[in-house]
Amino acid sequence: QVQLAESGGGLVQAGGSLRLSCAASGRTSSYAMGWFRQAPGKEREFVARITWSGSMTYYTDSLKGRFTISRDISKNTVYLQMNSLRPEDTAVYYCAAGKEYRRDYEYWGQGTQVTVSS
């Protein structure tokens, strides 16, 4: 069983930055971690993914260059650094964990709200 807890969300002005954290507990060895987001009235969308070792990362094309995913294995924590934020980045951001050989995710956090004002 894996438990995930996001933090770091909040209100920021357009052009600003935020760093989200996802603290994992339980048996996370060999789990890839991902970030997703869901804006009001929209479907949840993929943001980024990182392998267990942190050696490989993946991003949705539209966010490359502004968002960076990373992980600290010693702290069992995954981060999402978000720069040059735009109002359209406003959403609830979720982290998720899934076995590296699978494309789906087994465990999800409760989400953290990010609001970008114009």
Image: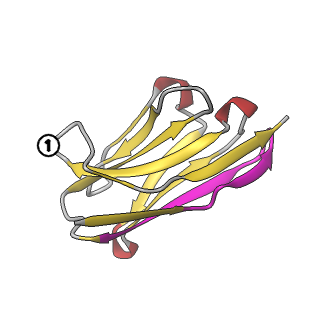
Residue placed furthest toward the front: 41
Callout 1, which amino acid?
Tyr
Q: Please, which colouring scheme is shown?
A: secondary structure
Magenta range: 7-25
Residue 88 rendering spot, x and y as whole percentages? 69, 29
Q: Residue at x 49, y 57 (%)?
A: 79
Question: Residue at coordinates 62% horizontally, 39% vertically from top-left?
Answer: 91
- Location of the N terminus by quadrant is bottom left
Q: Percent x, y for residue 117?
A: 82, 39
The answer to whether residue 15 of the structure is visible from this angle is: no
Q: Main secondary structure of the magenta part?
A: strand
- In this figure, which residue is indicated by the disc labeled 1? 101
- Identify the residue at the far right of this view: 118
Query: Is residue 15 a member of the stretch shown in magenta?
Result: yes
Residue drawn at x 71%, y 55% as measured from the top left: 10
Q: Nearer the viewer, residue 35 or 111?
A: 111
